[in-house]
Image (cartoon, rainbow, N blue to C red):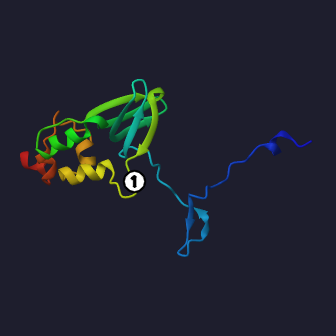
């Protein structure tokens, strides 16, 4: 009979996905260094349970206790883009969701020919979503016109 340790699967040192490839597409022996996809600043869509809702935003922190986001409910995404496009001041919601409510977390990426929510936000408003969703401590509401002008905060000083 084999010892118990021999029957256990040993983790592979690197996954196939993370393997570095040379110009021909052949795998190299050195593993590729990958950035954590769900790091602070990443734009994501969070699917929540109890009550069921979806939230689009930028990760502020991801911990075993839960997820902190700056963003908006997915149901009000179109209203948000219209409000920003029209130059109305807005404040992104800064929220914390406990981990037991998080059902799914996905990166906001394009799907085939469909643009991501971030791409839609940029095309409709002309404002980078990361700039619009970053928490601003200097003022409570963000004016969309200030985000579209470079060095707007320096002009007021």
Work out which residue is located at the far top of the displayed protein and give it. 50
Work out which residue is located at the far front of the displayed protein and give it. 113
Q: Is residue 135 left or right of residue 153?
A: right
Work out which residue is located at the far left of the displayed protein and give it. 156
Label 1 sits on residue? 111
Q: Splitting the image into 4 quarters, where does residue 32 fall?
A: bottom right
Q: Is residue 26 left or right of residue 125?
A: right
- What's the residue at 56%, 64% (across, down)? 20
- What's the residue at 36%, 29% (across, down)? 96
Where is residue 84 shown, x and y percent of the image? 16, 43
Where is residue 144 shown, x and y percent of the image? 14, 45
Residue nearest the viewer, comparing 116 with 11: 116
Where is residue 89 shown, x and y percent of the image? 13, 38
User: Quadrant of the image for the C terminus?
Assistant: top left
Q: Is residue 36 left or right of residue 144?
A: right
Element under label 1?
Answer: loop
- What's the residue at 15%, 52% (across, down)? 148
Residue nearest the viewer, comparing 154 with 36: 36
Q: Splitting the image into 4 quarters, where does residue 139 fall?
A: top left
Where is residue 5 shown, x and y percent of the image? 81, 42
- What's the residue at 31%, 48% (across, down)? 117
Q: Is residue 71 visible?
A: no
């Amino acid at each position: 009979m084999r010892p118990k340790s021999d029957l256990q699967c040993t983790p592979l040192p690197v996954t196939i996905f993370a393997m570095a490839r040379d110009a021909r597409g052949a795998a190299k022996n050195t593993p590729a260094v990958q950035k954590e996809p769900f790091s602070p600043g990443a734009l994501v869509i969070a699917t929540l349970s109890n009550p069921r809702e979806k939230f689009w935003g930028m990760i502020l922190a991801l911990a075993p206790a839960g997820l902190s986001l700056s963003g908006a409910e997915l149901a009000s995404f179109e209203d948000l883009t219209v409000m920003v496009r029209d130059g109305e001041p807005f404040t992104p919601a800064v929220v914390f969701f406990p981990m037991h409510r998080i059902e799914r977390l996905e990166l906001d990426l394009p799907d085939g020919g469909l643009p991501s929510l971030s791409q839609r936000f940029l095309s409709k408003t002309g404002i980078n979503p990361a700039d619009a969703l970053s928490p601003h401590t200097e003022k409570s509401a963000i004016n969309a016109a200030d985000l579209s002008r470079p060095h707007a905060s320096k002009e007021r000083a």
